Amino acid sequence: MRDYAMTYTSKLPNFICTQVTRKYIAQTGKDDFHPEATVMENLTYYEQQEHYKVMMVNDRYVDLSHDAVGGTTSSGDFGSLLKSTLSPHADATIEFDHWATLRGNECYAFSYRVTSGNSEWSVSVGKGDKSGERIIVGYRGLIYVDKKSHKILRISLEATDIPSTFPVREASDTLDYGYQTLSGQEFLLPLKAQVMLRDARFRSKNDLEFRLYKMYSADAVIKFDTDVPAPLPDDQTKEQPSQPQQQPPK
């Protein structure tokens, strides 16, 4: 798992895709999320760096930076979550948790924990404002590893040890990877992420989908599709029960 995470981004090609972010909000203590905005961005991955270009918000063309859209934002979905969690510096405590099935693939599901002293995951509020705050948090979660290929198909993070004085009370992120074919080659790339935050008054939920992957080249003509892709079916990200199996050896 660590070897895979450390080399994952170095094996990715340069590519472009469409990132669709559906933003929802609800009052704290309630689950009735209401749509807040739909954001479409061109995402270019070039030389292991992510570059965002916001194209549309609620079906209207805009000229905004990724961070200027407002509300909950996230970045770093193309490998940094894996690398920072499984790096030697993180010193994560990892244990086998259960068997699972994702997108038809039998998986090991491992639980893990990273302390705040070893963490690189940050949560911030008031970005771009002088009164903004940013903290490094510890976190825990699950890592799903394909039983056959040993590739990581999902990683989830849940913040721990958030100071009681910090405005954000809860934060979590779940990232699923799916196979994409680019120029005749198959790569395991981000499929969908869900980012959730809660403060004293509201809960926010961002459903991010990564669609329409294409190989990037210097002479490529980048065309933006104005039609918002339909949401991914639930079976693409829903964990399925697995047949009981013997636990892997310690």
Image (tube, rainbow, N blue to C red):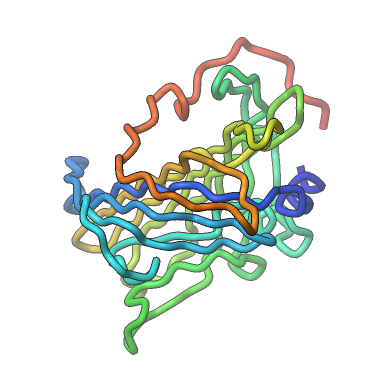
Q: Nearer the viewer, residue 111 or 196?
A: 196
Residue at horizontal 65 percent and vertical 25 percent from the top: 107
Residue at horizontal 60 percent and vertical 50 percent from the top: 15
Residue 101, above or below 73: above
Residue, far bottom: 130
Residue at horizontal 50 percent and vertical 19 percent from the top: 240
Q: Quadrant of the N terminus?
A: top right
Residue 226, above or below 165: above
Figure quadrant of residue 204: bottom left
Residue at horizontal 49 percent and vertical 60 percent from the top: 75
Left or right, 154 with respect to 228, comes to right
Q: Quadrant of the C terminus?
A: top right
Q: Nearer the viewer, residue 54 or 164?
A: 54
Left or right, 90 with respect to 49, comes to right
Residue 213, image x, y percentages: 53, 41
Figure quadrant of residue 99: top right
Residue 241, above or below 83: above
Residue 149, image x, y percentages: 76, 27
Residue 171, image x, y percentages: 41, 56
Figure quadrant of residue 83: bottom right
